[in-house]
Image (cartoon, grey):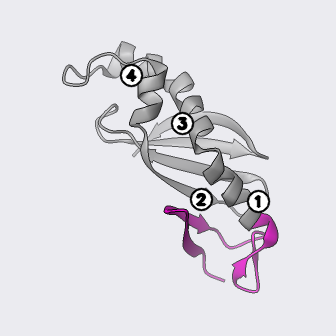
Amino acid sequence: MPNIELTFDNVPVRIMDGPYLKDGKPSVTAVKHYKSLVKRLPELRAFAAKELCSLYNDTWLDESIGTVDEKRFAHMLTNPSIHLFDEVGASVVYFDDAGLFAGHSIEVSVEDGTPTSADIIG
């Protein structure tokens, strides 16, 4: 079966082929999971800020942006998208970086509802 792409509350969601799909549609578990992630976007932004703000200020500092605190960093993360993987509980939320890391994306990995890492990708 192919992956499914949809939008929930203006957030793109991609569901990989696997246990989150049932008869070609999102399972009840998938719907609960992506709805929960959308609701928790402010928390996930704050997690990314806590993990990556010092990296920006210490290494990637852009003079046109200047130094940022965690609150501003989190606010700058835009255009979230959610990917539910082929293992129940495994998901990733992506954000645009507003130029903090020269246009790279921010990836927040979530395992069983808990954010586990935030990384720069792309």
User: Of label 4 and label 3, which has the lower sequence position?
Assistant: 3
Residue wearing tag 1:
87
User: Of label 2 and label 3, which has the lower sequence position?
Assistant: 3
Pinpoint residue 57: horizontal percent, then vertical percent: 37, 16
Q: Nearer the viewer, mark 4 or mark 3?
A: 3
Residue wearing tag 3:
45
User: Of label 1 and label 4, which has the lower sequence position?
Assistant: 4
- SS for dot 4: helix
User: Of label 4 and label 2, which has the lower sequence position?
Assistant: 4
Spatial CA distance of label 1 from label 3 is 23 Å
Residue at image x 55%, y 62%? 9
Spatial CA distance of label 2 from label 1 is 11 Å
Judged left or right of residue 69, residue 46 is right
Residue 26 within the magenta-colored segment of the rendering: yes
Residue 28 in the image: above or below residue 102: below
- The kind of residue tagged 4 is Tyr
Spatial CA distance of label 1 from label 4 is 32 Å
Residue 83's mark?
2
Q: Residues within 10 Å of mark 2 (few under 14, many from 20)?
A: some
Judged left or right of residue 62, residue 117 is right
- The kind of residue tagged 2 is His
- SS for dot 1: loop
Q: Looking at the figure, which quarter contains the N terminus? A: bottom right
- The kind of residue tagged 3 is Arg
- The kind of residue tagged 1 is Glu
For the magenta stretch, what is the residue range? 1-30
